Amino acid sequence: MKPSLPRSNAPLRPCRLPTGLVLAAVLVVRLCAADAPAPARTPPAALNQSAPANDGTGKESPVDANEVLFDRFDLARFNNQAASHYWLTGRPPPERELFFFPPDPPPLGAELRLFRPSAAGTPAPPGMAAFVNEPFYPVLSIRLAAEDLPQRLQLELDAYRAAKIELQNELRSTIVRLKGADPGARQHELAELARMQTPRIAALETTAGHLRSDLQRGGLYGLFAGRGDWNEYRNWRLESKSAGPSRADTLQMEFEVMRAAVYYQDGLSSAQRRLVREIAMELQAEVRQSEMGAQPAPDASLVFFLPETARIRLSANLPAGLATKLAAFLAAKKELKAELRATLYSYDEKSDRERTQVLARLAEKQAPRIAALEELAEDIRRGLADVADMPGPPAPPMLPPELEARISTYRGHKLELLKALHAVLASPDPAGRLSGRRDQVREQVAAFNRENTVRFAELNKEKGGLREALAQYMRTLGAARDQKSIDGLLEEFENARQQQEIWDRYRDYQAAVLMPGLSAEQRRLLYDAAIEELALPLPGGEVPR
């Protein structure tokens, strides 16, 4: 099946309305001034930790653009609401409406880099990081970008956000309190909390669905500006009988339709929306693979689990019974997604009403199988709890507590320098140029090095003292005392600490996916918090083609 090429590249023409209707619209707009947009509120930015560049030779080297962007000490990162766009200095007025889609959740334990190359396009509106895993992310972002969020909707969002944070904090605190508890008592308390929380979370998810609908524009404003639906700007459809474009274009078009369906298609259940998002993620990976030519086969150990879009890496040597259950889970999930993908594809040409009715019937048909999938996933979690080689941070080398404290202090000083460098690169360019240009990056980094010569010298002295202390410690163990061994031990400790920091940020993610005893609703609640905590860079706006 291949989609058709766009049928027309002609610009959209405004509709002609009777003069009386236009005057009535103006009058209504004036009378509705009380429903004016409320300014968006930006939540506090999370500060995550990392360390500055080091060339691995034992000396702090001058920092250049490549080291800033791709340093090996740059695994954990922190960022603001537009991290991938902090070298942009302004928003050019769009010729057509921009659409903002959230970033894809990474696999459990994936590296998180501090700096990324600047991305083209208009940054996502401030405040969207707080709603990064919500079903209304695109419809809210388009409202905020247009400064078109009525106060009523702002108040509803505030109430929704406050209720969700309260439930998340309640769940987190219970998990932490029960960490070392007796397994029986722990299971009982988790079950009791699930009994109390699950109805409230379910009601909150219903509210999120209503917000997805309410945030689309309606009334006279929607008549003039459009509902804010990505499909309004699309003048092509997926057609099974068309001669069609290349394979890469076919995949790209299908990916765009599936991604939009997650947020704009009526008739889907909440669970189906999450499954369709997995389909979109898989299609996007296929697009990238086809664009790059022959690539290695996908990592078979990385699988989509539950909550939907969460990916975990599992050993190929699972116990036979557990491996059989996992294979059944993956097969059942694949079948559900295949049905959804085929229906969305074949009904893309149909009317909105017909497509919605068909999907609503499919949602009713799939609901019992999705519930059974949740039960099977819980059974698998109980089995995985006894598997020894599950993903997790490596244990750092054993060192005396005073040495560990000195190394931690040293890393903290390096972190301060990296934060200062980040602030320099994130600051607006007074000349109004794009500060992502390589020559300006070099200028900024060179100036930073000159201003911090003393701090770099102190850091080198501190590292030298650490080498001496490590050499003395190794002598007491009768180990080799050459410089390579000392630097290797320091680097081993550094790498282990970085991995620990990364996994600290995945703590909620890991609990949501793998901890037995939570309800499906609690898992989704905690998973939403986990994705927000990762502070992923928000993609820029896109113009539908």
Image: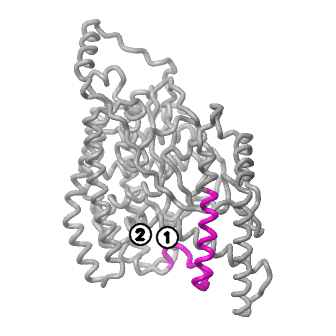
Q: Residue at x 40, y 65 (%)?
A: 508
Query: For mark 1, what is the residue?
Result: 314
Query: For mark 2, what is the residue?
Result: 326
Find out whether the residues at labels 1 and 2 contact each other: C-beta distance under 8 Å.
yes
Q: Point out residue 111 in the picture as x, y percentages from the top left corner.
A: 56, 61
Image position of 247 (left or right of 280): right
Q: Pick whichever, 58 or 69, lies toward us.
A: 58
- State the image quarter where residue 239 is shown: top left
- Helix, strand or loop at mark 1: loop
Q: Point out residue 496 in the picture as x, y percentages from the top left corner.
A: 59, 73
Q: Is residue 250 shown above or below 59? A: above
- Helix, strand or loop at mark 2: helix
| Sequence-first disc among 1 and 2 | 1
**Which label sits on residue 280?**
none
Residue count near mark 1 (Cα–Cα under 10 Å), binned few <14, some 14–19, many ≥20: some
Q: Residue at x 53, y 51 (%)?
A: 79
Q: Main secondary structure of the magenta part?
A: helix
Q: Residue at x 25, y 52 (%)?
A: 204
